[in-house]
Image (tube, rainbow, N blue to C red):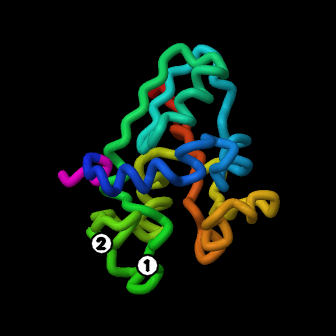
Amino acid sequence: MNNEYDNEVFFSEYAKMSRSREGLSAAGEWSRLKPCFPPLQGKTVLDLGCGYGWHCMYAAEQGAARVLGLDWIYTEAGSPRYWPVDDYFITGERNTRFLGCNVVKQHHTLTQILMGLLNNGFELEKVEEVKPPEEMMDIPGMKDELRRPMMLLVKASVKKREFKCR
């Protein structure tokens, strides 16, 4: 698997991004993502695609008992900044440029994502396509984030099953 973060040019450019330097306060999605978190006191938290670990630090500050952040998902998902919306129904691997480097990502339709959860015993609690808040529009590059959702937030939980005795 190709890991762009091992590429010095890519990582150097990634490190210059506001969200990399300033953390959650510079992440356009944070104002919408934060309310999705349940109370984290005593919980175990897994953050897939953790980047610099800002969400991991938040979980620890909120009292999570254990926190693990893995960043392998960025290579597969690529960057939403240049996410091509064309050929939407052609799913699978896509190649794009992000921070001056070629990046491989996986594209899935909204139907695949949501039905994948529903068909595997999850119940949807919240679905939101995130846009940055107005007060962040002065951050360089943030207005470009209005071209399409920055990310898709899905809050789901395992559906409670009723067992009946025979």
Q: Is residue 35 above or below residue 117?
A: above
Q: Are marks 1 and 2 in contact (CB under 8 Å)?
A: yes
Q: Which residue is mark 1?
A: 84
Residue for point 56% across, 20% down: 43
Q: Amino acid at mark 1?
A: Pro
The one of 69 and 24 positioned closer to us in this rendering: 24
Q: Earlier in the sequence, mark 1 or mark 2?
A: 1
- Residue 113 part of the magenta-drawn span: no
The one of 73 and 91 positioned closer to us in this rendering: 73
Q: Is residue 25 above or below residue 146?
A: above
Task: Tell me, for residue 32, which label it has, or none.
Answer: none
Outermost residue toward the left in this view? 1
Q: Is residue 31 above or below residue 88?
A: above
The one of 62 and 113 positioned closer to us in this rendering: 62
What is the span of residues highlighted in magenta in the rendered image?
1-5
Q: Position of residue 60 (x, y in %)?
A: 58, 21
Residue for point 64% across, 64% down: 140
Dominant SS in magenta: loop
Q: Amino acid at mark 2?
A: Arg
Under circle 1, the secondary element is loop
Q: Quadrant of residue 130?
A: bottom right
Q: Position of residue 114 (x, y in %)?
A: 50, 60
The answer for how far apart the CA atoms under marks 1 and 2 are is 9 Å
Tell me: 57 left or right of 2: right
Q: Which residue is mark 2?
A: 94
Tell me: 113 left or right of 92: right
